Structures are given as structure tokens and as C-alpha cells.
Amino acid sequence: MQPTLSFEQAPPISVPYRFFLTAPLFGAAAGLVLALLGPETLQSRWSPGALAMTHLIVVDFMLQAMCGSLLQFVAVVAGANIWRPRLVAAVVHPLITAGAIFLASAFLFEQPVLFLLAALVFVAALGTFLTVMAVALLRTPARGMSIHVLRLAVFGLLVTVVLGASLAITLGLPEDLSPDWPVLALVNVHVAWGLGGWALMLVIGVSYLVVPMFQLTPAYPVLLTRALPAGLFLVLCLWTLQLVPGPGGAPAWQSGVALAGVLLAGSYAVTTLWLQSRRRRRQADVTLKLWRGAMLSLAAFALSWIAFEAWPSLGESPRASVWLGVLALPGLFFSVITGMLYKIMPFLNWLHLQQQGGTGMPLPNMKQMIPEASMRGQMRLHFAALGLLLAAVVWPALTLPAGLAFTASCLWLERNLVGAARVYARFRDSVRAAAASRAAAHSDHA
Amino acid sequence: MSLPTQVLPDHHRHCDDLFVAAEESVQRSDWAAAAPAFARFRDQMQAHFEAEEAVLFPAFEAATGMSAGPTEMMRYEHEQMRSLLAQLAAACAARDGDTYGGVAETLLMLMQQHNMKEENILYPMCDQALGAEAERLGATIGAMLEPGKT
């Protein structure tokens, strides 16, 4: 059957916006957790505070923003709207939000039952989301590498959720009932699929389209667009072998596989920076700077990884993985997502106002949706917070200012996004009022 | 060989170049250069819309019987872009660099996501639907458009 090609431009604006407006609040919560719990949090990735903070960022900031964007983005790249977007958003958004709160609380207060609750809620939320996405991405007639990479990313999220739920069940059940699974290997594989197979894969798939689109850079080299996702996927599959008995668990094998993945990620970062340096549109806006900050963080992540391998005395410190985590989460993903939101929301505002029939009155253009100075200020604070977080890994005395700076930058982001949503609401109301008075005048006339 | 699916994406890139040339003149407040640069950009955008609406879309609609599908949406987006081009023309005439910059940003986003849909979805569908006729249409379309640098 020929799939229907609705070519609708977008799901209702409330569908992505509810995700976008929730996300920064949980970034702010992560910063507060750090500020309140203090230096111990950053001493090891296994501290309850670090685990809670990580999940507040990856689930409630990143996953929230990425789900919202993907619901929107699929309409453009696949040329078809997703199934019942309003209903899907109404189910998925509150469940992800609740699940992340359960999960962070489970780590912070060490409450086993909350792990079980979180697992249940996430399976329901992401089961719905993944089904709808898979249908949209598999039935599209669209061509291009991006679609394939997005399919891989959605698969990566599926693996992450299955492993995450298994871990939550292991931690949530009493010891005598708990399945005898290799927890450490499960964690390793869960983290790799979550950050590499889902989040980075999604960024890669989206970047093939948006990096050339925003700044008019040359396209990514065709060979790289194919080799990168395929290589990353292969690395993840090899990494997963540590879950079964055999050579997959050998340390030398594991460090070789991980290094291959890190080199792929690093080459992606360097290629993106190189393309951006060759852009035809010379102006450097906030989104471009945030993308560059993100790609520099990814390159720094790859270099740090190699250094930790080369000097085991550095790499064996429990703080080494916290350092990598800061570069990946606030450094890479937070920066990219912020940069994308600063483009997506102004454009969606304009697009939806336009569709409301705002042809009779002047509508604000994209640059009038969020003040440029406010985006630039928030970006600077975000990069300062990133610097402080990295410094706090080395000098724990900086933990409090780092946590507070990160919270402040998230709250500023929230203010900018709420401002954009308000501009939309204000103009929508005046467009409707104008339409109503035109209709009234028309009926009087008749 | 000049299939519409080769000619039109190349012309998208050409329009991008013309967009940048006009925007950069405006940013330098070089209005003497901006006016002809913008006029050239607008002319090529309009020629592109015309080539699709008068040649490619009718052929696709005749071949597939789909007149309310993708081509209708593309025509709608062309209208949106025409309206933004008119706003840019007014900003250019008024030498209002701020308005030009904001409207240009909006147009660029609309243009790029529109091109993406055409290049990844609609043009491949045209290739399939038009068969042997494609090459003749490609030549007709090519004659309507200014060639790019490549």
C-alpha cells in the first residue's frame, strides 16, 4: 500500500512545546542537587547524587527535549505527520516527567520501590513513543541518510529502555527475588546505547540536515554519512557482547572496542567543526556558537578518553568518568539542544501564527521571538557553568558555585523559552480577535 | 542528462548562494549592492517556483492523479515564501537592515525545510512517476533557470 503523504507541516504547536518548556526545569533541579549535596557528588559516577543528577539531565532534560523535537521533526524529514500527535504527547509527556522524578528520587533516597515504579512508567511512556516513531519512520517513502540514522537512533532508545528497565528491576526487587544479572556489564551497555546509540545517533542524523541548513555549509561527505552511523552501530553491538560469556568481557577487547567508538565520535566532531568553518553564511549566531561548543566538548571527550587510556594512573581515578560525563552531558548534549531550541521555537512560532491566518496583519519575524541579547547572555552563562563543572571535578571546592551556575543557566533558558511561547500566545490571540471582528463586520454588512 | 531531480536541487544551491550575497550586502549596509543582489535572488526564486508550478507539478499530478497531495503543500509553501520575499523587498527599499535580517532568517528556515522535503521526498516520487518524460521536462525546466556556478 502506498503510504499516505499528508505533507502536513507540523503537529499542533502544543505538542512539542510542552516538552520544551518542561526540560530546562529539570536541568535546574540537577544543578540544585549538585549544589546541595556538595563535593562528594562529583567524586565518583556511582555516588547517589551523581546518579540522580545524571538521570535528571539525560531523561528529564535530554529525553524530554529530544522526544518533543522528534515528534516535530519527523513531519519534515519523513513528510508525514505522526499518528494522533496530541494523544501521544498527552500520554508520553506526563509519564516521562513522572518517571524521571521517580528515578532521580530512587537514587537519592535509595528507595527500591521507586525503581520499580520508574521502570513501569518508562516502559509505558517510551513503548508508546517508540511504536509511533517506528511506524512513521518505517512507512515513509522519504530518501536520504538522515532517515536511516533516525531509525538507528530509535532502535538505540529501545535498547536503552530495555536495559534500563532491567537494571531498575534488579535494583528494585529484594535480593532473594532479584535476577542474577551482571549489573556492571548491564550499566556499561545501557550507558553506551543511551549516549551513543540514541542521543549521539540522533544528533548525527539531525545534523546531516540542519548543519548545512542553518549556516549553508557544504554537505557532510557522503562516505562519512554512511560509515559513521554504521561504524557506531557495529561498535555498540560488539560492546554489547560483554553481556554474554566469552571474549566480549576481556579488558583488552573492551578497551579496543570503546576506543573505536570514541575515534568515530571524535571524527564526527572534527568534521562538523570543519564544515562550519567553510560555511557560506558568515554570520555566527547563538545557535552556531552552541553547536561549536558542543562539538568542541565532543572532541575534548575523545581526547580525554585517549589520554585516560594512555596514562592509566589518570584513567583509574573515579573522577575520570565524571570528567567525561560533564563533557558529554552539559558539554555536548545540553549545548546542542539549547542551540536547536533557539532555532526551532522562533520558527514554529512564525509557522503556526502564519497558519492561523495571520496574513492580514504584520507578524513578528524569527528574530523578534526571543531577544538576541538574552540568548547570548544565557549561552555565556551556560559555557561558564560548563567550565566551573569541569573545574569542580578537579577542585571540589568549586562544586557549589558550579551547581548554582548550572541551575541559573537552566532557569535563564526556561525564561527565554517561556518568553517565546508568550509571544506566540499574544499574537495568536490578536490574530483570532482580528479574524472574529472581520467576521462580525462581514455579517453586519450582510 | 538533465532530469528535473538533478536540475532543481542544483538550482536550490544556486538560490542559497544568491540569498547569502544579498544578505551580506545588507549586513554591510551596502545598499547600492544589496538592491541588485536582492533583485537577482528574488528573480531566481520566482523562476524556480514557476518552473515547478507550471511544468513539474502538473506533469506529476497528471501522471499520478494526486492533485491534493504533496504538490498542494509545496504550492502553499511557495505562497508563504512569496509573501516573505515581498517583505524583504519592502525592507530593502526602506533600507531597514534589522527587518531584512529577521525576515531573511525566517525565509531561510522555510526555504531549507521546503527544499529538504522536495529533494528527499517529492523529487524522487517525480522520478518514479514521470519515467521517460522526465528528461524532456528536465530540459524545459533547465531553460527557465539561471545556471549556478557548477
Image (cartoon, rainbow, N blue to C red):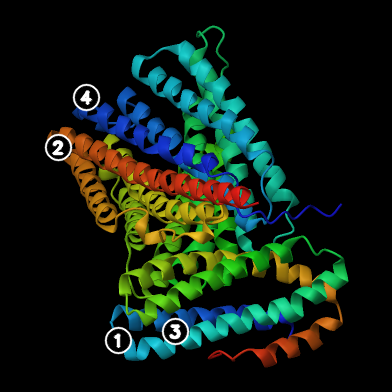
The disc numbered 4 marks a residue on which chain?
A: A
Asked if residue A185 is positioned above or below residue A427 in the image, the reply reads: above
Q: Nearer the viewer, mark 2 or mark 1?
A: 1
Are marks 3 and 1 in one subunit?
yes
Q: Nearer the viewer, mark 4 or mark 1?
A: 1
Which residue is more in the foreground, A203 or B93?
A: B93
How many residues crowd mark 4 within 10 Å: few (<14), some (14–19), many (20+)?
some
Q: Residue A414 location in percent, x, y?
A: 33, 40
In which quarter of the view is residue A177 placed?
A: top right
Look at mark 4 in the image and give the residue it sits on. A36
- Residue type, numbered disc 1: Asp
How many residues crowd mark 3 within 10 Å: few (<14), some (14–19), many (20+)?
many
Tell me if B84 is positioned left or right of A444 in this view: left
Asked if marks 4 and 1 touch (Cβ < 8 Å), the reply is no
Which residue is more in the foreground, A333 or A426?
A: A426
Q: CA distance from mark 2 to mark 1?
A: 49 Å
Look at mark 2 in the image and give the residue it sits on. A398
Q: Secondary structure at mark 2?
A: helix
Q: CA distance from mark 3 to mark 1?
A: 12 Å
Q: Residue at x 54, y 50 (%)?
A: A435
- Residue type, numbered disc 4: Leu
Look at mark 1 in the image and give the residue it sits on. B30
- Residue type, numbered disc 3: Phe
Q: Nearer the viewer, mark 3 or mark 4?
A: 3
Q: Residue furthest left?
A: A397
Look at mark 3 in the image and give the residue it sits on. B38
